[in-house]
Image: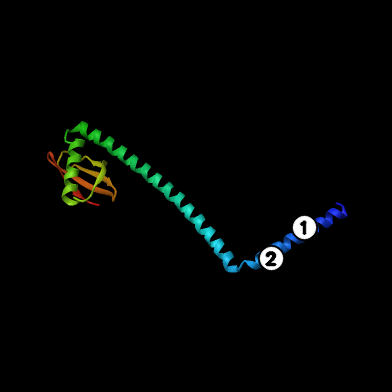
Amino acid sequence: MGPFLFSLLLSVRAALSSLLSGILARVSLIAIVAVVLGALIVIFFVGGLFAARRQRVASEERLRERITHADRALEAARASDRGWDRVVLETATREALERERPDFRYETLHLVLVDDRPGTEEDRALMGAIGDEGELRIMLIRRGNIWEGQLIA
């Protein structure tokens, strides 16, 4: 490196150094801390959004799996004795909802669990009603050919 280039680099370095020290002298420590904290808040907020979305997708997948499993169990129970009719189960669920939570508006009803015991007197089904306020669970208990519903959550 020639002496001219070396002196040019030294003068550029000195100019940058004085410029940075001038800027830092004008910015207070409180402002620097505030900017760093603001950046951290934004980073944590965005990270929280991504984590919440991943968790929601995972829970929806688990719900779909449970519904699929319950539907298969319903079909097996229905094949073995004719008391398991989805229309009858949904009617009993609607009646229980109207009786216990008449203000609850739901969009869908789904079968969550089938408990098909020997005979017909102790069969149970757990139904879910999903609406704007969240999900309600209704336990249906079979007594002969009649299903009775009871709100559990």
Whether label 2 touches label 1, CB < 8 Å: no
Q: Is residue 79 visible?
A: yes
Q: Residue furthest toward the top?
A: 79
Residue wearing tag 2:
22
Residue at x 30% of width, y 40% of height: 67
Image position of 103 (left or right of 58): left
- Measured from the top left, where is residue 81 in percent x and y? 18, 33
Quarter of the figure with residue 80: top left
Q: Amino acid at mark 1?
A: Val
Q: Reply above or below: 10 against 98.
A: below
Residue at x 65% of width, y 65% of height: 24
- Measured from the top left, where is residue 46 in percent x and y? 48, 52
Image position of 63 (left or right of 52): left
Q: How many marks?
A: 2
Q: Residue furthest toward the right?
A: 3
- Is residue 1 or residue 13 the one in the foreground? 13
Residue wearing tag 1:
12
SS type, badge 2 = helix
Q: Earlier in the sequence, mark 2 or mark 1?
A: 1
Q: Amino acid at mark 2?
A: Gly
Residue at x 40% of width, y 44% of height: 57
- Measured from the top left, where is residue 96 in percent x and y? 17, 47
Residue at x 50% of width, y 59% of height: 41
- Measured from the top left, where is residue 6 in percent x and y? 83, 55
Q: Reply above or below: 104 against 114.
A: below
The crowding category of the residue bearing disc 2, from other C-alpha atoms within 10 Å (few below 14, some 14 to 19, many at least 20), is few
- Is residue 68 or residue 119 the one in the foreground? 68
The crowding category of the residue bearing disc 1, from other C-alpha atoms within 10 Å (few below 14, some 14 to 19, many at least 20), is few
SS type, badge 1 = helix
Color style of the picture: rainbow
Residue at mark 2 to residue at mark 1: CA–CA distance: 15 Å
Q: Is residue 149 visible?
A: no
